[in-house]
Image (cartoon, rainbow, N blue to C red):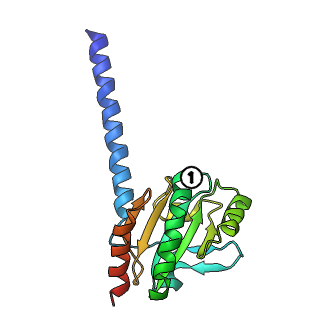
Amino acid sequence: MQAQASSSRGLWIKLAAVAVIAAAAAFAYVKVNTGHAAPDVTFTRLDGQQVALKDLRGKVVMVNFWATSCTTCVGEMPQMIETYNKYKASGLDFVAIAMSYDPPNYVLNYTETRKLPFQVALDTQDKLSNAFGDVKLTPTTFVIDKNGNIIKRYVGAPQFAELHQLLEKALAAA
């Protein structure tokens, strides 16, 4: 009987721990999800140029966390390129951020061989992924409006028809 009570108490402790972790994750998700200002970060592009996110205000910006080892990332990249090419003349900017575990030479090779038309940055010390709410899963894409507010977060490949509708609405906004 005592072993059963101890086992039951252990289960409740585990459930409580899971609930606390889930609540913290939900808070972090909401903190950097829709309606909040994008973090004030600066990207270092592959060519070494520094780009501050706040300098892109007035444009709709997609920030895509990805890795060359991520099959979903590689699979969605042609559609990301098409999306960027379709909307760049309307004011879309795009920053693809390679995760810290992605070897820089792999990122450079992928960028050059696939002729990525947008800005590519390295997150060598996890500063960018941490600033965006401790991004761990790739791909994770944020859509940021002209005022610098996050309007959508996609974990995994987005539904591109929905993404295009969102971009059209954001690009049309004053």
Left or right: 5 as drawn, with respect to 100: left
Q: What element carries label 1?
A: loop
In what quadrant of the picture does the N terminus appear? top left
Measuring from the top left, give residue 65's x and y in whole percent: 53, 62
The percent coordinates of residue 19 (x first, y second) are: 31, 41
Dot 1: few (<14), some (14–19), or many (≥20) neighbours within 10 Å? few
**Residue displayed at 69% across by 66% down:** 113
Is 120 situated left or right of 23 in this image?
right
Quarter holding residue 78: bottom right
Residue designated by label 1: 70
Residue at (52, 75) in percent of width and height: 94
| Residue that lies at the very extreme toward the top in this rendered image | 1
Q: Which amino acid, mark 1?
A: Cys
Q: Residue 146 is drawn in which quadrant?
A: bottom left
* Residue 149, image x, y percentages: 38, 76
Q: Where is residue 18 in the image (x, y as percent from the top left)?
A: 35, 39
Total numbered circles: 1
Residue depicted at 64% across the width and 67% down the height: 114
Image point (34%, 44%), residue name: 20
Task: Locate residue 60 relative to residue 65 in the image: left or right.
Answer: left
Which quadrant of the view contains residue 142?
Answer: bottom left
Give the residue furthest to the bottom: 174
Q: Nearer the viewer, residue 113 or 91?
A: 113
Quarter occupied by the C terminus: bottom left
Nearest the camera: 21 or 128? 128
